[in-house]
Amino acid sequence: DGDEPPRSASSLLLAASRSARLPGLGLEGLAIKARALVTLGMMHLDGDGAEQDDAAAVECFQGVVSAHREAKAALAGVQRRGVRSRKECTPLPTVRLTRPAPELPLQGEAACAVMLLGALRTAEEDAREVLETMDRFTFFANGRP
């Protein structure tokens, strides 16, 4: 009858983070991957909705850091050489991706690129914070002062 059994949230998040379609979405794909990995990492860390597995959580959080690094590198490359195809990256090459002057709001694709980079930065900050907390816990759990 073609009905598929329901999939768990963790398997859906894992599939989303590994989708072959994400690279074609540029920054948006990296933002989707990062948010999926943050959520999946927290599920593994807490054992809520996924098996409690610190190693899997660390792997997810490191994937978020990697996605943010990849986005920054892609944008830097586009700014140096200009956009050659829409698959590479959508922001305009003349846009500075630092905090824009409030009186000169960005428009269109450039504004979207800045917003997506902000989402990636937030996901990376969340991931780094959890990784640092895990390091501190491990340090003290092992009896070190």
Image (cartoon, rainbow, N blue to C red):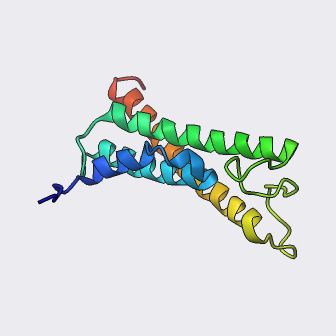
**Residue lying furthest left:** 1
Q: Is residue 70 left or right of residue 43?
A: right
> How far across and how far down the image is residue 38, in percent?
44, 49
Q: Residue at x 86, y 42 (%)?
A: 81
> How far across and how far down the image is residue 127, in percent?
50, 45
**Residue 71 quadrant:** top right
Q: Nearer the viewer, residue 67 or 42?
A: 67
Q: Nearer the viewer, residue 74 or 114?
A: 74
**Residue 116 quadrant:** bottom right
> How far across and how far down the image is residue 93, in percent?
84, 53
Residue 33 in sight here: yes
> How far across and how far down the image is residue 28, in percent?
59, 56
**Residue lying furthest front:** 1
Q: Residue at x 73, y 65 (%)?
A: 109
Q: Residue at x 87, y 73 (%)?
A: 104
Give the quarter of the figure containing the N terminus: bottom left
**Residue lying furthest bottom:** 103
Q: Nearer the viewer, residue 138 or 69?
A: 69
Q: Residue at x 50, y 36 (%)?
A: 62
Number of callouts in the render? Answer: 0
91 relative to 42, above or below? below
Q: Is residue 142 left or right of residue 92?
A: left
116 relative to 108, above or below? above
Q: Nearer the viewer, residue 113 or 90?
A: 90
139 relative to 8, above or below? above
Give the quarter of the figure containing the C terminus: top left
Residue 122 in sight here: no
